[in-house]
């Protein structure tokens, strides 16, 4: 094995470097994919909180983010990264009030999709 690596390094240095880079990129993407899957498999249907974005809520409750934004009178073309607390401040309403609106919108979308709200 050691001799094969040494031979590759001596005779095909660029090919060996390219292979190592490709291997590292593949490993990085595999670890990232596993971490992403592990995170979202344990963060389903979590209670809505002030720090969450509308996109996070949509992902957690498995509803289309554009439709959720539409029901909340937010821009559907814009990928909004504001938290619920920030949106509530801008609307000059209590965060709890907006959270209730978000929960109702989620229930509406899940009912339309044939799923029951949890």
Image (cartoon, rainbow, N blue to C red):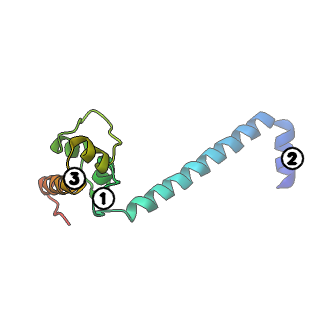
Residues under numbered marks 3 and 1 in contact, where contact means CB atoms less than 8 Å apart = no
Residue 74 lies left or right of residue 81; in this view the side is left
Of pointers 2 and 1, the one earlier in the residue sequence: 2
Measuring 25% from the left and 47% from the top, which residue is drawn there?
88
Q: Position of residue 51 (x, y in %)?
A: 35, 54
Q: Are marks 2 and 1 in contact (CB under 8 Å)?
A: no
Q: Residue 64: x and y, percent?
A: 24, 47
The tag on residue 23 is none
Q: Which mark is residue 6?
A: 2
Q: Quadrant of residue 46?
A: bottom left
Q: Residue at x 18, y 55 (%)?
A: 97
Q: Which label was assigned to residue 49? A: 1
Work out whether residue 97 or residue 116 is closer to the camera in this orientation and state it.
97
Q: Residue at x 52, y 52 (%)?
A: 32
Where is residue 39 drawn, in percent x and y? 44, 60
Instruction: Calculate the distance from the C-alpha at mark 2 to the C-alpha at mark 1.
Output: 56 Å
User: If you read the primary sequence from the N terminus, does the residue marked by circle 3 or circle 1 appear first?
Assistant: 1
Question: Residue beneath label 3, please?
Answer: 94
Identify the element where label 2 is drawn. Answer: helix
Q: Is residue 69 above or below residue 62?
A: above
Mark 3 or 1, which is nearer the eye? 3
Q: Secondary structure at mark 3?
A: loop
| Image point (50%, 58%), residue name | 34
Few, some or many residues within 10 Å of mark 1 (<14, 14–19, 20+): some
In which quadrant will I find the C terminus? bottom left
Q: Nearer the viewer, mark 2 or mark 1?
A: 1
Q: Is residue 114 above or below residue 8?
A: below
Q: Looking at the image, is mark 2 or mark 3 earlier in the sequence? A: 2
Q: Is residue 35 left or right of residue 50?
A: right
Mark 3 and mark 1: Cα distance apart in space? 12 Å
Q: Label 2 to label 3, Cα distance in Å?
A: 66 Å
């Amino acid at each position: 094995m050691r001799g094969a690596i040494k031979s590759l390094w001596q005779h095909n240095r660029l090919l060996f470097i390219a292979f190592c880079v490709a291997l590292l990129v593949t490993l990085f993407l595999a670890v990232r994919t596993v971490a992403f899957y592990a995170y979202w498999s344990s963060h389903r249907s979590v209670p809505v909180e002030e720090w969450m974005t509308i996109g996070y809520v949509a992902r957690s409750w498995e509803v289309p983010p554009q439709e959720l934004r539409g029901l909340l009178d937010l821009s559907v073309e814009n990928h909004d990264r504001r938290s619920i607390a920030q949106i509530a401040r801008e609307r000059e309403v209590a965060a709890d009030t907006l959270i209730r609106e978000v929960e109702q919108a989620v229930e509406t979308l899940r009912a339309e999709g044939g799923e029951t709200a949890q």
